[in-house]
């Protein structure tokens, strides 16, 4: 089993890299190459996927909000909405 484990890991990362490349936004792809070229590069199992994750994968455009802050969120239910309750 230990002999097969590296092959399974490379296969899983390769498939994840190809799916990630296919589903990423074409405007956010880095590296100066088009998304199609990056997808063709990721066809190379280990090297292509590593290049995608290091140089081509889009970076997150907005950082996640700090924990505990709810800036910009609206209440879900009408009875949780202060504006709705004021109008009753």
Image (tube, rainbow, N blue to C red):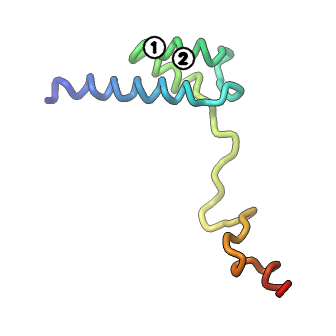
For the view shown, which residue lies furthest in the bottom direction?
Answer: 88
User: Label 1: few (<14), some or many (≥20) within 10 Å?
Assistant: some
For the view shown, which residue lies furthest in the right direction?
Answer: 87
Q: Secondary structure at mark 1?
A: loop
Residue displayed at 49% across by 28% down: 19
Q: Quadrant of residue 35?
A: top right
Residue holding disc 2 = 39
- Residue 37 x %, y %: 59, 12
Q: Nearer the viewer, residue 41 or 68?
A: 41
Q: Nearer the viewer, residue 35 or 62?
A: 35
- Residue 72 x %, y %: 75, 62
Residue holding disc 1 = 43
Q: Are marks 2 and 1 in contact (CB under 8 Å)?
A: yes
- Residue 3 x %, y %: 16, 24
User: Label 2: few (<14), some or many (≥20) within 10 Å?
Assistant: many
Q: Quadrant of residue 12?
A: top left
Q: Is residue 62 above or below residue 68?
A: above
Residue displayed at 64% across by 39% down: 60
Query: Number of numbered discs present?
Result: 2
Instruction: Name the quarter where the N terminus is drawn.
Output: top left
């Amino acid at each position: 089993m230990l002999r097969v484990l590296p092959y399974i890991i490379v296969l899983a990362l390769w498939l994840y890299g190809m799916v990630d490349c296919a589903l990423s936004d074409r405007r956010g792809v880095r590296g100066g190459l088009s998304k199609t070229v990056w997808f063709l590069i990721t066809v190379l199992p280990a090297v292509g996927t590593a290049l995608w994750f290091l140089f081509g994968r889009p970076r997150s455009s907005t950082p996640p909000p700090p924990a505990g802050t709810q800036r910009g969120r609206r209440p879900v239910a009408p009875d949780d909405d202060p504006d709705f309750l004021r109008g009753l």
